[in-house]
Structure formats: structure tokens, C-alpha cells
């Protein structure tokens, strides 16, 4: 199916990955963004104001009536709205309500309004830590966090709607994604922007645990391209697929790379206690995406980090103020 001249709904379209996806979809489609701006930012979508092919709705996927009315006349849904992993550690209930119940709301409304295709953007956190590597789509799903469990519930709802009602649902599973518009702030902040912010302020990196935990980092433009290719692929209906680079890298190595690139390698990491439920190893199997729709992630970690740092430093942020506002999250006191 061609993703052109469609009316598409992007939930979480003001967020990090969602807003990058909206930029691509808006080139050939009418896009409706549904976002409650809890972590999403107006500045991520501000350039679409006045663009008649992008409509931005400030609303909540937990609002059943709203979801029912917003999905009328929609051809495709890309569902990305989420409460993040770090929130799940101190507020599991909101994670469940948004990530699981919110997804069920969307499935019910999509079915009722005969939406053609439903693309659920899941997360590698559904797998838990690698029991074998690389982790293909048949890897057991043993999430370590409530976030991972709620994302697993969401993806199972999407697939159940295919099996029960024939809805054209599919599940795309990105591994850790980084790049422009990624969160750097407070508990929402992700590891790469946090390292960059600290390095630019001459502060050492803070690592939770021994730093030997691995992630499969994928640049956001690759992730978005993967989501779009998957969503256009008819063989993906009723299927799950990983979207990742297919390379594991330790958190310590990421810190070293960033600090070297910014000539701050002399700053030695501060080691904090493990984050509860932290996955030890993530290394994606990427063969299925290649086989079904010819996707491989093209941007390597060094190039991606370079591009991200260039973007971050061009934003005119007051780095000193951001650093003062930054928190090193204490998982026990939840502050
Ligand atoms: N960032 C990653 O590394 C990564 C990795 C794997 C999967 N994912 C998945 O990609 C998707 C997007 O993640 P992201 O990193 O862009 O997160 P994000 O926090 O930047 O985006 C989530 C968006 O959802 C919105 N939102 C939250 N609750 C809502 C609600 N109740 N109603 C409407 N909107 C709501 C937020 O305001 C935000 O704009 C998520 O589904 C996430 O599970 C992300």
C-alpha cells in the first residue's frame, strides 16, 4: 500500500519520534496529530502551524469520546503516544492507563470507524533483557518494567484486533532511538542527550550501574524510515518487526565516544546505583525488516552522534541553565 494522499492520525505526534514521523508523512499526506503535550513539545510541531495538511489536536488518548471522533475518516493510525519508562518506575498506574488502556481505546475506535491500517509503535522493552542475541521477533517477551509490560499489552491488543476482527494491524518494535528533538530534560531525559549536556558543561557523565549494559542505538531518521516502510508493507499485517541498527554498544562506550568527540575525555564517570529493572543487554535481530521491506539502518553510531551534537548545539539552548535544572534521578526517593 502506498502511503500517499492518505488521512493519517499520529498519536504522540508532538513527541520525539512522533514529530519526526509527522514531518515525513506530511510531505504526501494529510496528518492529524493527537497529543496531550505531557512530554511532547509545541516547538516540535510549530513549523506546521498554518500548513493546511497538518491538524494538531491537544487531547488525551484516554478520552474515549475524543478518540472516537478523531478517528472518523482516518485511513491509517500510527500510534506512538506513551508515558515513558522512567515514569513507570514511580507511577506505574499512569503507564498502564495511557500505554495499555489508551491503546485499547484506539483499537476500539479504529475498528468502529473502519480505519484501514493500525501501526502500533512498540518498544524493545517488551523483550526484557536478551536471553539470546541477536534478539529476533521470536525472542521471549519478558519485560522487566511496568513500561515494558504496558507496551506488551498495547501490542497484543493491536494484534488481537487483527486476529479477531481482521483489522490491518501491525507492530513495529524500535530499539533505543536518538537524534534531534530527543528529551534531555529531567526524568524524561534520555542517556545520550544527558551525556552531551553534561559534557558541554564540563560535568562528568553519570552512569547507573557498571556501564556494561548494552543498547542497540538507532538514529531517529532511520527509525522513522523503518516505521514508514513497515507501514506500507502488506506482508506486515498481523506481524511484529524490529527496527534497529543491529549493533550493540555499552553505555560506558557511548559516554566515552561523546566525551572524546567533545574533547572532555579527562572527565571520569560518576557511578550511581543500578536503575531498577534496567535491561542488561539489547542487541536486535534485523533480518525480518530487511527481508520483508528491504530496511537497513544506514546511520552508524559515530555519524549519528555527530549529527545529534550538531543539532543540539545549534538550538541556542542556555546550557548553563539546563544543567542547573537537570536532575540525577534518585530511583529510591523518586526525586
Ligand atoms: N525513544 C526511544 O528510544 C524509543 C524506543 C523504542 C520505542 N519507542 C516508542 O516510540 C514511541 C514514541 O516515543 P518517544 O521517545 O518519541 O516519546 P515522547 O515522550 O517524546 O513522545 C510521546 C508523546 O506522547 C504524548 N502523550 C503522552 N501521554 C499521552 C496521552 N495520554 N494522550 C495523548 N498524547 C500523549 C506526549 O505528550 C508525547 O508527545 C513510544 O510509543 C515509545 O514506546 C521509543
Image: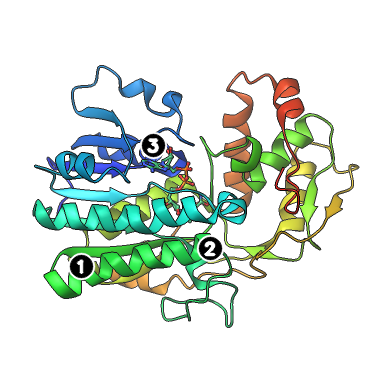
Between circles 3 and 1, the one closer to the viewer is 1
* First-in-chain label (1 vs 2): 2
Q: Position of residue 312 (x, y in %)?
A: 60, 30
Residue 262 shows in the view: yes
Q: Nearer the viewer, residue 8 or 85?
A: 85
* First-in-chain label (3 vs 1): 3
Residue 294 shows in the view: no
Labelled disc at residue 146: 2
- Say which element carries label 3: helix
Q: Is mark 3 within 8 Å of ligand 1?
A: yes
Dot 1: few (<14), some (14–19), or many (≥20) neighbours within 10 Å?
A: many
Residue behind mark 1? 161
* First-in-chain label (2 vs 3): 3
Q: Residue at 59% of width from left, 42% of height from top?
A: 188
Dot 3: few (<14), some (14–19), or many (≥20) neighbours within 10 Å?
A: many
Q: What colour scheme has been applied to the protein in the rendered image? A: rainbow
Q: Quadrant of residue 195?
A: top right
Q: Position of residue 36 (x, y in %)?
A: 38, 35
Labelled disc at residue 204: none
Q: Residue at 40% of width from left, 50% of height from top?
A: 98
Q: Position of residue 311 (x, y in %)?
A: 57, 30
Q: Are marks 1 and 2 in contact (CB under 8 Å)?
A: no
Question: What whole-number distance in Å separates the C-alpha atoms at marks 3 and 1?
Answer: 26 Å
- Say which element carries label 2: helix
- Say which element carries label 1: helix
Dot 2: few (<14), some (14–19), or many (≥20) neighbours within 10 Å?
A: many
Residue 147 appears left or right of 49? right
Labelled disc at residue 19: 3
When the figure is inspected, residue 293 is found, relative to residue 51, above or below; the finding is below
Q: Quadrant of residue 266?
A: top right
When the figure is inspected, residue 175 is found, relative to residue 84, above or below; the finding is below
Q: Quadrant of residue 226?
A: bottom left
Amino acid at each position: 500500500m502506498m502511503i500517499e494522499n492518505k488521512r493519517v492520525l499520529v498519536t504522540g505526534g508532538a513527541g520525539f519520534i512522533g514529530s519526526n514521523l509527522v514531518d515525513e508523512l506530511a510531505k504526501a499526506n494529510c496528518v492529524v496529530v493527537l497529543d496531550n503535550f505531557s512530554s511532547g513539545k509545541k516547538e516540535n510541531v510549530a513549523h506546521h502551524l498554518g500548513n493546511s495538511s497538518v491538524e494538531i489536536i491537544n487531547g488525551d488518548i484516554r478520552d474515549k469520546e475524543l478518540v472516537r471522533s478523531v478517528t472518523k475518516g482516518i485511513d491509517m493510525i500510527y500510534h506512538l503516544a506513551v508515558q515513558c519508562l522512567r515514569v513507570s518506575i514511580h507511577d506505574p498506574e499512569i503507564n498502564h492507563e495511557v500505554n495499555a488502556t489508551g491503546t485499547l481505546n484506539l483499537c476500539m475506535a479504529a475498528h468502529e470507524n473502519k480505519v484501514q491500517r493500525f501501526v502500533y509503535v512498540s518498544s524493545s522493552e517488551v523483550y526484557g533483557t536478551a536471553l539470546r542475541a541477536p534478539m529476533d521477533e521470536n525472542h521471549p517477551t519478558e519485560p522487566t518494567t511496568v513500561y515494558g509490560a504496558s507496551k506488551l499489552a498495547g501490542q497484543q491488543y493491536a494484534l488481537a484486533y487483527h486476529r479477531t476482527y481482521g483489522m490491518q494491524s501491525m507492530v513495529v518494535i524500535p530499539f533505543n532511538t536518538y537524534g534531534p528533538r530527543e528529551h534531555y530534560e529531567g526524568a524524561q531525559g534520555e542517556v545520550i542527550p544527558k551525556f552531551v549536556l553534561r559534557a558541554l558543561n564540563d560535568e562528568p557523565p553519570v552512569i547507573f550501574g557498571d556501564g556494561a549494559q548494552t543498547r542497540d542505538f538507532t538514529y531517529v531518521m532511520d527509525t522513522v524510515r523503518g516505521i514508514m516502510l513497515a507501514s506500507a508493507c502488506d506482508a506486515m499485517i498481523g506481524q511484529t518487526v524490529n527496527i534497529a541498527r543491529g549493533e550493540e554498544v555499552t553505555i560506558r562506550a557511548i559516554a566515552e565516544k561523546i566525551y572524546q568527540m567533545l574533547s572532555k575525555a579527562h572527565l571520569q564517570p560518576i557511578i550511581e546505583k543500578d536503575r531498577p529493572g534496567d535491561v542488561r543487554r539489547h542487541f536486535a535481530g534485523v533480518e525480518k525488516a530487511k527481508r520483508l521491506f528491504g530496511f537497513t539502518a544506514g546511520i552508524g553510531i559515530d555519524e549519528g552522534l555527530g549529527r545529534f551534537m550538531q543539532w543540539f548545539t545549534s538550538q541556542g539552548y542556555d546550557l548553563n541553565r539546563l544543567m542547573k535544572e537537570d536532575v540525577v534521578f534518585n530511583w529510591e526517593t523518586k526525586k
